[in-house]
Image (tube, rainbow, N blue to C red):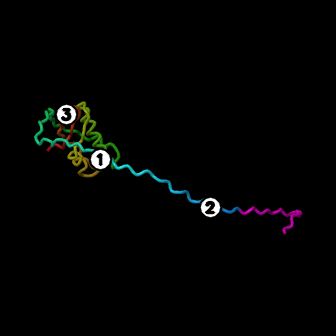
Amino acid sequence: MADTTIKPGIKPTTTAPVVKATVKPAAAPVAKAPAAKPVEQKKETKPAAKTESKPKAEEKKEERVMTVSLRDAWNGRRNNRAPSALKVLKREIERHTKKEAKIDQSLNSVVWAKGAQKPPRTVKVRLEIGANAVRAYAAK
């Protein structure tokens, strides 16, 4: 048997009672309701699309050719000249047409042809002016 007297300077040690883990018996499997069969949905068939469609009324687009000076793009940083030239180009087109300008890939490639540092000083632009927006292409 262990000595239960307390000695000075020594803390009494207590042993924790050992707890045995109890295992719960497995619950009986719950019977599941039989799975409902998926309801087949009837697919509605649409009539075949007609190959001939009515021609849409074409928008009247005005075309205009203008020369835009990109001089202001050369005032900025050297490596930022081509992006700046595109901003100048868009600003000038919007200023002259009073509509939102969209720059075509052909015009973009003309501005970037010599790289970011040396865009052209001037660009000839062909504009197609629609009802809401202006599309700008490189003039040939």
Dot 3, how many residues are within 10 Å of its Cα: few (below 14), some (14-19), or many (20+)? some
Q: Quadrant of the C terminus?
A: top left
Q: Out of 33 and 98, give the one closest to the viewer.
A: 33
- The residue lying at 29 percent from left, 50 percent from top is 116
For the residue carrying disc 2, how many other residues have a C-alpha within 10 Å: few (<14), some (14-19), or many (20+)? few
Residue that carries the numbered disc 1 in the rendered image: 40
Q: Which residue is mark 2?
A: 23
Q: Amino acid at mark 1?
A: Glu
Majority secondary structure of the magenta segment?
A: loop
What separation in Å lies between label 1 and label 3 (alpha carbons)? Answer: 50 Å
**Amino acid identity at mark 3:** Gly
Say which residue appears at 24% left-offset and 41% top-offset: 103
Q: Please, what secondary structure does the residue beneath circle 1 have? A: loop
Disc 3 element? loop
Residue 83 locus on image (x, y percent)? 30, 45
> Which residue was labeled with disc 3?
130
Q: Nearer the viewer, mark 1 or mark 3?
A: 1
What separation in Å lies between label 1 and label 2 (alpha carbons)? 47 Å
Give, as a single range, the part of the protein colored magenta.
1-18
Residue 121: quarter of image: top left
Residue 73 image point, x, y percent: 30, 42
Residues marked 2 and 3 touching at CB (< 8 Å): no
